[in-house]
Amino acid sequence: MDIRPEPFEPPAPFPRTVPPSRLEIIKVMFRNPLELWGAPSYSLPYIQVKFFGRLTTIANHPGLIRHVLVENAANYAMQPIRQLVLRPILRDGLLTAEGAVWKRSRKAMAPVFTPRHARGFAGKMLRISETFAERYDAAARTGEPVNIAVGMTELTYEILADTLFSGEIATGTEGFADRVDSLLHNMGRIDPLDLLQAPAWIPRLTRIPGKRALSAFRKIVSDTMNARRARMTADPDGVPDDFLTLLLRLEGPEGLTRDEIEDNILTFIGAGHETTARALAWTLYCVSESPHFRLLMEEEIDRVMAEGRDPVEWLEAMPHVRAAFEEALRLYPPAPSINRAPIEDDQWTDENGRTITLPKGTSVLIMPWTLHRHVLYWEKPRHFMPERFLPEHRDRIGRFQYLPFGAGPRICIGATFALQEAVIALAVLMKRFRFDVLAGERPWPVQRLTTQPLNGIAMRVSARPA
């Protein structure tokens, strides 16, 4: 007999049943785009609607997604509204660059993020996570609540700084989470002028408060580059052979420009850790409301650590920990939308012989937020059920119904890095502590580039018995 409790349903907007007015669309897109989508987006394989007078295709069908992101990816550019939001922040970083610039950057960075190279970071990830965990000792003694969203931002930043930049980013951890929050809260929102696709040179008044945070990040990047260049000149043989040095050595006519290097460093410092940080916070929250599965995770963590397994093996040796993280990625995908626009007219035919036309220049939205909660592809799509990602069930999940890292040529370059980092961090934290959500705490997901908990997640920390 199955005595498991009913799975936890974490907070999220319910599908709209009444289409919004134009004015409401503008308000909701600025406030929180996750609240915009109606029932058809969660129940139909694809939809074509007029959005501010422009045809928009919402693609949920795995075959259509495969067509756009893989089979005919060369015919799809970044969607203009997405670029109007992201390019002021990241310019020609890997997330926003296109064409030859993107190809140069992707090729240059690929060696650092191969699975084999990423596994080499496991020891540092473990050491940093263990040191970071000590910060929660006081909270465990006093019962003082902690904002786990801030904590995970700090942890993932420290891991990124040490693994990719050898700890030589020109800023410390203190206040870093606040600067990231200010940058994304003010710069990572869709301005009404973006919806109208007004030219980029027209100022977006809603983003003015974020300019200071962006300038601060740009200065951090510039100072980091200058300090490493000085080391490379003074001691060429003693300089760390890391991601930062790799990029700086690529500067030149055959490689990357100085501005492209700066943009990519900013992308990784400002956003590279952000996706993992948000997913870790959502994982700890969902697990705290799922005590049955948390117990399975704790037993698994205790057993693997007692065996003395190398942390490089934890990703495979801890399937329950990995499953919890992957389920949190499903419910709260860090990148909630993937936006494309056909360069030339395109068509796609489904399994029933129905053909849809994707005209040149129109919008194609592939939204992990709705896809991951879609009634056609998931059992109890709104519930936290990590069991679906355990090895014995994983083959039931189609490749193009689960897109936490995207797909195709532009798939997230750091996917293996992020999964390994997450499992190690969760194992270290959950070995020492239990994180319990405060009574009445219902963190609300909002889209600010990533899927963030509005106002963070307050949790209480307690030490686990030895």
Image (cartoon, rainbow, N blue to C red):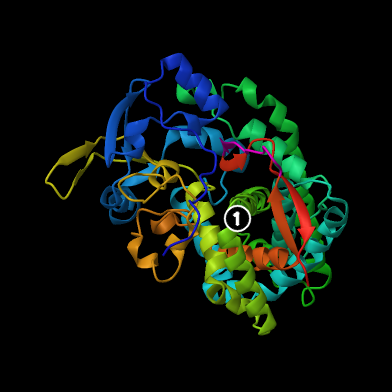
Decide: few, some or many residues near mark 1? Use Cα within 10 Å; few <14, some 14-19, many ≥20.
Answer: many
Dot 1: what SS? helix
In the visual, does 231 lie left or right of 64?
right
The magenta span reads: 438-448
Residue that badge 1 annotates:
287
Percent of width and height locating residue 273 = 65, 54
- To which quarter of the image does residue 294 belong? bottom right
Percent of width and height locating residue 262 = 66, 50
Q: Nearer the viewer, residue 311 or 297?
A: 297
Above or below: residue 66 compared with residue 228: above
**At label 1, which amino acid type do we have?**
Val
| Residue at 72% from the left image edge and 49% from the top image edge | 148
Q: Residue 446: say if magenta.
A: yes
In the visual, does 102 lie left or right of 281?
left
What type of secondary structure mainly makes up the magenta span? loop
Q: Residue 45: say if magenta.
A: no
In the visual, does 29 lie left or right of 18?
right
